[in-house]
Amino acid sequence: MTNYRVFAGWMPGLLVLGLLQACSEQFDPWHQDANTGRWYTQALVAQGQQVYQSHCASCHGAKAEATPQWIKPDADGLYPPPPLNGTAHAWHHPFPMLKKTINEGTSGRMPAWQDKLSDAEVDAVIAWFQSLWPDQGYLIWQRRHKH
Ligand code: HEC
């Protein structure tokens, strides 16, 4: 009986551990794909390019290079679409934050995509623009996640 109670007391803790495990298995920024050396596969990057060209290129530029003057707000005090190619600050944001911005948009002019893109498509588009990042930016971004 006593043993049973001790075990029951541990149950919620075990459940939380299990959930954390499940989450970290879903996305691992430290995973090294055999071909890309990064968390994503080449196939995911190819899928992401399609998503990007259809939905994002009109604002962020065909090569994710727009807008060069991304630091300057417009007359309304709103910021233009920043480059996602590693020259602006997308690499400051850990994966969950990038996903949140894409899914929910911002109070500025970035639209929300959660009703238009699947979870897998959002992952793919992130993989695509990350494939443009130089290794140094990628490494700094990687270190923003806990091991
Ligand atoms: C209508 C124009 C528009 C479209 C289309 C658009 N964006 Fe944006 N995006 C913006 C603007 C403007 C910002 C800056 C928002 C702000 O500062 O509030 C932004 C910001 C972002 C950021 C944050 C970057 C950073 O450095 O903090 C990411 C990531 C992003 N967009 C990804 C995407 C992706 C992926 C798509 C396509 C699925 C997309 N955007 C489509 C206008 C757009």
Image: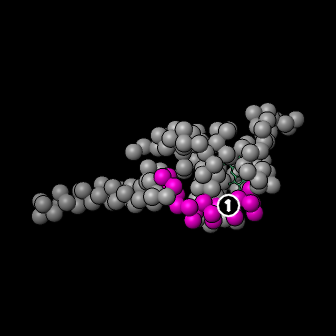
**Main secondary structure of the magenta stretch:** helix
Q: Residue at x 64, y 42 (%)?
A: 86
Position of 13 relative to 4 (above/below): above
90 left or right, relative to 59 = left
* Residue depicted at 34% across the width and 60% down the height: 18
Among the 4 quarters of the image, the one containing residue 46: bottom right
The residue beneath circle 1 is 49
Where in the figure is residue 105, as x and y percent of width and height?
70, 51
Q: Amino acid at mark 1?
A: Gln
Question: Would residue 53 be counted in the magenta stretch?
Answer: yes
Q: Which quarter of the rendering shows the C terminus?
A: top left
Residue 17 lies in the magenta-colored region: no
Relative vertical location of residue 100 with respect to residue 146 in this rendering, above or below: below
Residue 137 position within the rendered picture, expressed as x and y whole percent measured from the top left: 57, 39
As drawn, is 96 to the left or to the right of 23?
A: right
Q: Can you tell which quarter of the image residue 87 is in?
A: top right
Q: Is residue 100 visible?
A: no
Region of the chain picked out in magenta, as a range: 36-56
Residue 57 percent across, percent down from the top left? 76, 55
Label 1: few (<14), some (14–19) or many (≥20) C-alpha neighbours in 10 Å: many
**Residue 31 figure quarter:** bottom left
The answer to whether residue 118 is above or below residue 126 is below
Residue at 79% across, 35% down = 69
Q: Residue furthest top?
A: 72
Q: Nearer the viewer, residue 103 or 51?
A: 51
Q: Quadrant of the N terminus?
A: bottom left
Tell me the element at label 1: helix
Residue 63 point in image, percent of width and height:
73, 51
Image label count: 1
Identify the residue shown where x is 72% and y is 49%.
Answer: 64
Q: Is residue 106 left or right of residue 142?
A: right
